[in-house]
Amino acid sequence: MNGKSVKVFVNFIMIFILISVFLTGCSGENAGISYGKKELTSQEKMEDFEYMYNILKENYPYFEVNKRVNGVDWLKNKEIYESRIENTKNNEDFMEELNSILSELHNGHTNVLFKKNFPDFYSVYKDMDSRKPWFNVLTNKKSMEWYGFSEDSLKDESSDGLFSSTKPAFKTDKIVPDKVAYLKIRLMDPKRIEEDGKEIKKFYNKIEDYDKLIIDIRGNGGGSDYYWIENIIKPLTFKPLSVNYYMFERGGEYNKKIYDSMGSEFRDISSISPEILNKMPQEVKTKFKNYEISTAVIKPYNSINFKGKIYMLIDKAVYSSSDGFASFAKASKFATLIGERTGGDGIGPDPIIFSLPNSGAIVRYSSLLCLNPDYTINEEVQTAPDIEVNPAVGNSYKEDLCIQAAIKD
């Protein structure tokens, strides 16, 4: 890989994106969970909200998208949000209300970190040197006390976390013997990359001369990019694949601190040629200061050099890392996409996290506006299929319209 591609897969890869539904949960799902050693005062809550509001105001990239898509002017709702915070009764209520306010940004990577998720984040970032700023936020004294967390508590955690399954994250089949093979990936499970990879590659060896391979990621909410890079693209592609992504940054101090520590090399937007800039959304010119072009390059490795057609089945539940897979597959022509638009937000780095000054509560947010290769905003238009078909999973292969579309294409 060249320098740029290394940057993508070290600095700007979705190394471990926790599924948004798991993080945000449903109303009342976190009821009865205590936070902190003492109750926050009304003033402390308001100060924490003000801090969060200002961090997002200066750094968050999707305010304009939220206005267009959802009709929500989040920044203008400040007084409404302040009133809601003022009316919270205790620390638990405060956390729920903060998350409810953040949910009005309609971004699955922007939310409060709840107590039940803290051990997962701690475990993920503990040994990752490239994500030291994340770990430093998690381990500041106030946050550790707010979440009641210690190293010892990890030993007591049951193995029912998000990515704790001992079952394979995939299944295989031969829909039409000697012609059409099928690979279902239900989750880009970071804990099963190597183990699943061994079995998936055995399957590839059995179907290397097939005419078609259908990769089904419907319902796949994300996980680790390394799962699909190592287990799908590298062993199948017969040539290097490359895709360029523009990523834009607002210029806020908090973003700058994090990305400077990662060695990111953003450039001023003025260096983009007018011809290219005019193809981009208007807010890029008015709301953003810096950008980087990240070139994702994936080369064959122990490849079977599959020469048949590859189809990918997608739906709106395909999000985060899985959307990144769909986006890359479409732009690089690795696969033909069938189904409906994905859920999006699969291009870019891990969401940035910060802690609130009084409580120590941790908030995470998407930090970069990322464009699809056609210069549309991925968060806004997601990844569109090449062949639009009802994505509902059928009771059988014959009743599954996406599978039938791939067979008949």
Image (cartoon, rainbow, N blue to C red):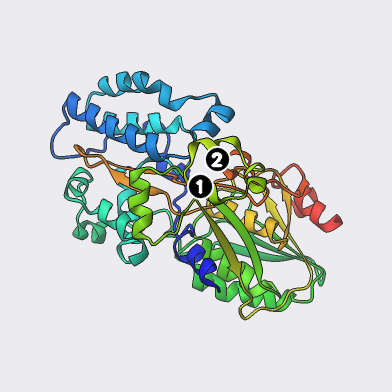
Residue 360 appears at what percent x and percent y? 22, 42
Q: Secondary structure at mark 1?
A: strand
Left of 389 or right of it: where is 198?
Answer: left
Which residue is the site of mark 1?
Answer: 248
Residue 186 appears at what percent x and percent y? 57, 56
Q: Residues within 10 Å of mark 2 (few under 14, many from 20)?
A: many
Q: Amino acid at mark 1?
A: Phe
Q: Amino acid at mark 2?
A: Val
Residue located at (25% from left, 33% from top):
48
Of 56 and 171, nearer the camera is 56
Residue 284 shows which numbered tag? 2
Q: Is residue 400 visible?
A: no
Q: Secondary structure at mark 2?
A: helix
Q: Are marks 2 and 1 in contact (CB under 8 Å)?
A: yes
Left of 334 or right of it: where is 31?
Answer: left
Of 27 and 331, nearer the camera is 331
Give the quadrant of residue 392: top right
Q: Can you say which quadrant of the picture contains the N terminus?
A: bottom right
Of 305 and 5, nearer the camera is 5
Residue 233 appears at what percent x and percent y? 63, 68
Residue located at (29% from left, 24% from top):
85
Residue 293 appears at what percent x and percent y? 55, 57
Left of 328 or right of it: where is 10?
Answer: left
Using the image, determine if residue 295 lies above or below residue 35. below
Q: Is residue 98 visible?
A: yes
Residue located at (32% from left, 55% from top):
134
Q: Residues within 10 Å of mark 1 (few under 14, many from 20)?
A: many
Q: Earlier in the sequence, mark 2 or mark 1?
A: 1
